[in-house]
Amino acid sequence: MKTPPFNLFQPKTIDEAISISARFVENDEKFDWIAGGTDLLPNYKWHLNTKPNVISLASIDELHHLDSTHIGAMVRLHDLANSKETHPIIKKAAASIASVLIRQSGTVGGNIALDTRCFWFNQAEEWRRSIEWCHKCDCDTSADCRVIPNQNELCVATYQADLAPTLLVLNAKIHLCGPEGSRELFLSEFFELDGIKRNILKRGEIITHLTLDEEINSWSGDYQKLSLRKSWDFPEAGVAVAWRDAAQSSDEGIELRIATTALESIPRLHNDITNEALLNKYSISEIASKLRKDVKPVNNTAFPPNYRKKMVEVLCKKALHGLKGVLP
C-alpha cells in the first residue's frame, strides 16, 4: 500500500519544533512526530491512524547527545548498543532490538514511545475493514475491542519495546518538553495502562532525553527476552533485572529491581515482588514463580498468553543467574 500524503516539517531546534506543534494544537490540527520512522512509516503504509502533518526531530542536534548518564531521544539504537558510555544492561537490550538496519534508523525516544501492538490492529486496511475495525483504530465507528469483546472502553494492545524495562530497573528519569514548558519524572510514571493513550505525553509534547543516576555503574544486571525469531521481531516477553550489594550502596543488604515488557499495555516494575523476596529471602526459583503469577498477558501477539507466562519464569531465572550464591 502507498503511504498517504502528508506535510513534513523539519525544525532545527527544540524551540522551533515546539512552536510548530503549539500552532497545530492551537488550531486543533492533527499531526504526528517522527524520529527514526521505523514504526510510524510502516503504520502509515497500512493506513493506521495517519495524520496530515508530520514533524521530524532528525535535524535537532541537541537530541543526539549520549553519555553515561544522559541519553538523547534521537540517539540511534545502533549507537546506544555500541557506545562505551552505555550501561551493560541497556547495551544488551539495545543490541537485541530488531535488525542492524532497523537499529541504524530507530531511536531511543521512538522505542520508549513505541505504539502498542495487537494482531487485530497491525494489519492492512482492507483486512481490518473486512472484520469491521477494532477499538484502537475504529474509523469513527465506535467499534468494540476484538480481544475483550463487547466493550470499547479499554484497549489492551501490548507494549512491545525492549529499552523501557532496562531503564526502569536503573531508575531512569524522562525529560519532556511541550507548549506548556518542560518537565521531568521517573520513567515508571510515564506510561498509562491504555493501549491507545499509552503514556502521559500531552499534545505537542516530546521526549527530549533520559537521565540516569551518577551511581549507575554500581548496578549490575541482565535482560532476557522471548521473540519469535532472534532478529527483527518485537519481544513476546522481556525481563530486566538490576541489583547491587551492600558494599556498593548505603543500604544494609542487596538491592533488587525487576521489570517486564511485552506482557501488558505498559512495561512494569515489580517492586512488590522484589521487596517481598528480599524480606523473606526468596530463592531465584521462588522469585521467578512469583513473577510468572504477577504478569497478565492477553491473547493478541504471536504466542499464547499461557506460554508467555511460563516463559517469563524461565527468563527471570536466566536474568537472575548472576545472583546465584547471593540469593538462596
Image (cartoon, rainbow, N blue to C red):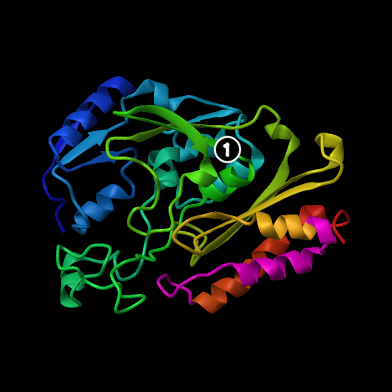
Q: From the viewer's perspective, tell me whether residue 167 is left or right of residue 24.
A: right
The residue lying toward the viewer, choosing from 263 and 273, is 273
Residue carrying label 1: 172
Q: Could you say which quadrant of the image residue 5 lies in?
A: top left
Residue density around tag 1, few if under 14, some if 14–19, many if 20 or more, within 10 Å? many
Magenta stretch holds residue 97: no
The stretch of residues the image draws in magenta is: 278-304
Any magenta on residue 292?
yes
Residue 174 visible to the viewer: no
Q: How many marks?
A: 1
Above/below status of 283 relative to 221 = below
Q: Determine whether 211 is above or below 153 in the image.
A: above
| Quadrant occupied by the C terminus | bottom right
Judge from the rendering whether residue 259 lies leftward or rightward of residue 276; answer left or right. left
**Which residue: 26% across, 55% down?**
43
- Image spot of residue 176 (x, y percent): 41, 32
Asked if residue 157 shows in the view, the reply is: yes
Residue type of the residue flagged with mark 1? Ala
Q: Nearer the viewer, residue 9 or 182?
A: 182
Identify the residue at horizontal 35%, vertical 65% (top origin). 155
The spot of residue 125 in percent (x, y) is 18, 65
Residue in front for this viewpoint, 83 or 148: 148
Q: Residue 195 placed where, x, y %?
A: 37, 59
Q: Residue 295 sits in which quadrant?
A: bottom right
In the picture, measured across the screen, residue 8 lies left or right of residue 102, that is left
Image height check: is 278 above or below 305? above
* SS under mark 1: loop
Indicate the quadrant containing the N terminus: top left, top right, bottom left or bottom right. bottom left
Residue visible at 78% across and 52% down in the picture: 322
Q: Give x and y (percent) for residue 42.
A: 27, 53
**Residue at the image point whose x is 20% and y is 65% from the top:** 138
